[in-house]
């Protein structure tokens, strides 16, 4: 029996098991963010220290992702998936049991490492068990999970933390993990796989761990430490640059590379991956700044900010299966172009917001962006995997996911940095216009009842709000143009995108 013509007894159950594991992993990347202040207070540490809960997970997740292809060839795809799910459930339980911040950070690091293979393996196994003409549907389902989980994450996290205990954020993974592992084991246990025992590329592995680890910590900590004015950040940057350049040279010349960089010789993989990384980075940047802006500037609670962002998942939820069914009738480059136009337009709409914007307007723009999201994940994934042989799919999926996650990390660091910078810039400009020599300013103060401490404090608050608002407008305008610019890249890919190997 060949590796990729296996049919599980129940395709729906197998799909549910594979999707749940991915859902659990993607959910976990966002669910803890909301609970950080509570965790910090509970374990008696500063909020700065508590961010290591996110950093440690991200670093180890980023290290594990590019290794997925190599490990799956060594022990088999199904075994790797089952092992990762079980270890993820165990480390989640340990996170919930942690008694100190150091314990929690250690268990989160292990949890991040074991979560690495879950998404690429779900994708690879879904493509292996679905008939060839239904592969688009498999990718659409996984894509939908990737979109819905980050929306559900903060809302669920907030609700669990408020009503129960932050520990349940981690315990909740245990029953889901056990269920997913059992279902996939029962459905895929007859699947034969060819494994290859290659010597371990220790040189490449060491360079990867050092390079990616340093880069991820640099991106996570850069804003807190004011970037390159900190010698720690400069050192991390240099270590990461040298290690990653050496890693690329090493892997390209190694007989048994641990990460298959030769996949970039294929133009569909390269252009698809570049569009995925930058498109996802911009998408992630919106998901990051929008709730923060609603909470800081518009006075929303965490739950309401989550609810305002949530409509983005409605269209993907309703139409992903149609997307999978009919996408092969279209040129996928047109679908991706449509996605970038919609996401760009939604960014320009947000750039039209002001301090009077109501909940419905925010939610409707999110709903509209959902259309762009549907046209984003599945067509792009199909394009970038389209020319790869079956034995290269795990490599390609792991590598593309790794770069996508790294793109999200860059987006998260640079977004906050840019947003703060523009706020300082606008604040300075607004301040210049408010002085005792400015007739309009004085007239406004007289109307308020004269120059008093409370009136000046009120003006101070208004200036602050306006500066944040102007910075937010700049930010969404930039993202809008970024989406539009990405349209060019996807047209470097060449059809056919649905062919049989």
Image: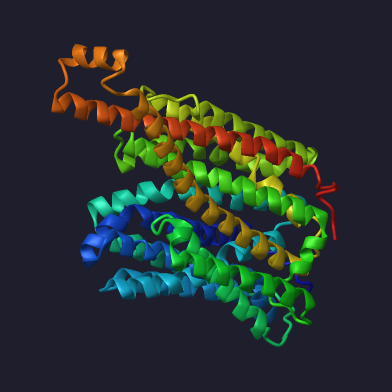
Left or right, 393 with reference to 320 = right
In the rendered image, the residue lying farthest to the front is 437
Q: Position of residue 426 (x, y in %)?
A: 42, 32
Residue in the foreground of this view, choosing between 233 and 210: 233
Query: Can the viewer see residue 182?
Result: no
Above or below for 302 versus 93: above
Q: Position of residue 5 (x, y in %)?
A: 76, 65
Colour scheme shown:
rainbow
Name the image quarter holding residue 357. Answer: top left
Above or below for 419 versus 462: below
Q: Residue at x 26, y 31 (%)?
A: 461
Residue in the foreground of this view, choosing between 450 and 155: 450
Q: Position of residue 37 (x, y in %)?
A: 27, 56
Name the image quarter holding residue 487. Answer: top right
Left or right, 401 with reference to 336 = left
Total marks in image: 0
Q: Residue at x 61, y 33 (%)?
A: 344
Q: Residue at x 54, y 76 (%)?
A: 83
Q: Looking at the figure, which quarter contains the C terminus?
A: bottom right
Residue in the foreground of this view, choosing between 372 and 258: 258
Q: Residue at x 75, y 57 (%)?
A: 385
Q: Position of residue 91 (x, y in %)?
A: 41, 73
Q: Looking at the figure, which quarter contains the N terminus?
A: bottom right
Query: Can the viewer see residue 44?
Result: yes
Above or below for 376 versus 229: above
Left or right, 103 with reference to 232 = left
Residue in the foreground of this view, choosing between 266 and 178: 266
Above or below for 281 versus 322: below
Name the image quarter holding residue 168. Answer: bottom left
């Amino acid at each position: 029996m060949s590796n990729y013509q296996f049919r599980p007894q129940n395709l729906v159950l197998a799909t549910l098991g594979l999707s749940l594991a991915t859902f659990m992993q993607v959910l976990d990347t966002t669910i803890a963010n909301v609970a950080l202040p509570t965790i910090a207070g509970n374990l008696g540490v500063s909020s700065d220290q508590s961010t290591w809960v996110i950093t440690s997970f991200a670093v180890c997740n980023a290290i594990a992702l590019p290794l997925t292809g190599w490990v799956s060839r060594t022990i088999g795809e199904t075994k790797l998936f089952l092992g990762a799910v079980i270890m993820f459930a165990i480390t989640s339980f340990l996170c919930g049991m942690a008694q100190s911040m150091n314990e929690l950070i250690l268990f989160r690091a292990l949890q991040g490492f074991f979560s690495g293979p879950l998404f690429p393996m779900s994708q690879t196994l879904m493509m292996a068990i679905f008939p060839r003409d239904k592969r688009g549907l498999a990718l659409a389902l996984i894509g939908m999970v990737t979109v819905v989980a980050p929306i559900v994450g903060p809302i669920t996290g907030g609700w669990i933390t408020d009503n129960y205990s932050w520990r349940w954020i981690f315990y909740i993974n245990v029953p889901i993990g056990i269920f997913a592992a059992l279902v996939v084991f029962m459905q895929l246990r007859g699947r034969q796989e060819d494994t290859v025992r290659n010597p371990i590329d220790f040189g490449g592995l060491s360079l990867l761990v050092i390079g990616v680890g340093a880069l991820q910590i640099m991106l996570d900590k850069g804003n807190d430490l004011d970037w390159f004015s900190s010698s720690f950040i400069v050192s991390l940057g240099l270590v990461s640059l040298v290690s990653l350049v050496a890693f690329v040279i090493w892997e390209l010349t190694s007989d048994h590379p641990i990460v298959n960089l030769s996949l970039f010789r294929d133009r569909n993989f390269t252009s698809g991956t570049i569009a995925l990384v930058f498109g996802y980075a911009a998408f992630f940047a919106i998901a990051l700044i929008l709730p923060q802006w609603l909470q800081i500037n518009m006075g929303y609670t965490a739950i309401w900010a989550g609810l305002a962002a949530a409509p983005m998942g409605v269209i993907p939820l309703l139409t992903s299966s149609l997307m999978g069914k009919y996408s092969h009738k279209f040129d996928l480059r047109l679908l991706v172009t449509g996605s970038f136009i919609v996401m760009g337009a939604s960014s320009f709409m947000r750039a039209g917001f002001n301090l009077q914007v109501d909940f419905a307007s925010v939610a409707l723009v999110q709903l509209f962006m959902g259309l762009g999201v549907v046209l984003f994940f599945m067509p792009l994934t199909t394009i970038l995997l389209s020319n790869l042989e079956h034995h290269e799919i795990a490599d390609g999926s792991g590598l593309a996911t790794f770069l996508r996650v790294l793109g999200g990390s860059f987006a998260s660091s640079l977004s906050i940095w840019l947003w703060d910078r523009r706020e300082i810039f606008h604040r300075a400009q607004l301040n210049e216009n408010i002085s005792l020599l400015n007739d309009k300013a004085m007239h406004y103060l007289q109307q308020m009842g004269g120059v008093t401490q409370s009136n000046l404090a009120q003006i101070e608050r208004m200036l602050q709000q306006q500066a944040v608002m102007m910075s937010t407008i700049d930010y969404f305008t930039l993202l809008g143009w970024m989406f539009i610019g990405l349209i060019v890249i996807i047209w470097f890919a060449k059809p056919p995108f649905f062919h049989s190997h």
